Amino acid sequence: MRFVIVTGVSGAGKSTALKMLEDADYFCVDNLPIPLIEKFASMMIEMDAEEIRNVGLGVDVRSGQALDELESVLDDLKGQGYDYEILFLDACDSVLIKRYQETRRNHPLSPRGRVDRGIRLEREKLGFLKTRADYIIDTSQLLTRDLRQELENIFLKDREFNSLMVSILSFGFKYGIPGDGDLIFDVRFLPNPYYLDHLRPMSGEDEGVFDYVMSFEAATVFADKVEEMLRFLIPLYIKEGKTSLVVGIGCTGGKHRSVALAREIYQRVKGQAGYGIRLEHRDLPKDPMRKKCCTEGV
C-alpha cells in the first residue's frame, strides 16, 4: 500500500491534488484530526489490500493547534514501521494572493486581515512539513493539466522525481519583462518577420515563420548556447532544491522571433529525466490580428 500525506500552503492546489489521486483509485481523506492519523494508518494497513490499495491523506492548517502534534505523530509512524510519503504543494506569494483575490476567499489564518499575513503565518507553521517532504511541487506556473501530469509521473508511473519545473516562456518586451523570470534572453538581434508582408499575419507557431527565423545562423548558434547553458544549470538548480525555473525569450511583440526560439529550445531540452518542462507564449494572445480573428470567429 502507498500512503501519501498531501499538504501545502492554502491556495497551492492541495484539494486539486487529492481529487486527482482519488481519480487514480486512491482512498482519500481530507482534514482528518491529527490524533486520529496513527489509528487511521493502522486501520488502512489491516484492511484487505484488494479493497484499498493506496491512500491519500490531506493535512493543512485547518487542524489548528493540533498541527503542533503532527511532527511527533509522524515520528511515531516511522518508529512503528509505517511507510508514508509527503507531497507538499507550494506557490509563490504573489500567485497565492492573486488566487485569493480571484476566488474572493479569506485566508484561514487571517480571516479578517491581510492575505499576505496569513500566508506568512502558514509558511511558519508548515515549515517542518516542507522540510520532511518527499516531493515538493511549485504550482505557481502550472496549469491543472500540468499538475495532473506531475502527479501521474510520481504516483502512477513511478518515475524518478525532482521538484524542478522549467517553463520556457516567450514574451514581448513592449508588454514588459516577466516578473517571475529567472533567465531572460533578448532575441531582437534577429531579422524581424513582421517586415515581410507574407509572414506578418503569422506567428512563430506557424512553420513559415519558424523556418524563416531558424534559417539564420545567429538563431541556431543562440539556441545551441542556451541549450548548453540549461543543461549545465538545471542539474545544479535541482541539487540546490530550486522548484521553479522560468526561462524568458523575448522579442518586440512576443509574436514571431521569441515564439519560434522558445519552441526550438523547448524541443531541445524536453524529455530529459529529472524535471518537468512546459512551453508558454505569454503575449501571443495579445496580438491585434489574433484578437480580431477571435472576435470575428475565424
Image (cartoon, helix red, strand yellow):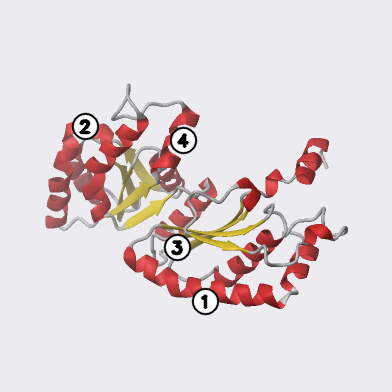
Q: Is residue 50 left or right of residue 141?
A: left
Q: Which residue is mark 1?
A: 228
Q: Depth-wise, is mark 1 or mark 2 nearer the camera?
A: 1
Say which amino acid is labelled 3. Lys
Q: Give how far apart the Cα atoms at labels 3 and 1 are.
A: 29 Å
Q: Is residue 161 left or right of residue 46?
A: right
Classify mark 2: helix, strand or loop.
helix
Say which amino acid is labelled 4. Arg
Q: Give how far apart the Cα atoms at labels 3 and 4 are.
A: 30 Å
Q: Which residue is mark 2?
A: 64
Neighbourhood count class around disc 2 (C-alpha, 10 Å): few under 14, some 14–19, many 20 upward? few
Nearer the N terminus, badge 4 or badge 2?
2
Q: Which residue is mark 4?
A: 99
Nearer the N terminus, badge 3 or badge 1?
3
Q: What x and y, as percent, mark residue 234?
A: 43, 69
Classify mark 3: helix, strand or loop.
loop
Neighbourhood count class around disc 4 (C-alpha, 10 Å): few under 14, some 14–19, many 20 upward? some
Say which amino acid is labelled 2. Gly
Q: Give how far apart the Cα atoms at labels 1 and 4 are.
A: 36 Å
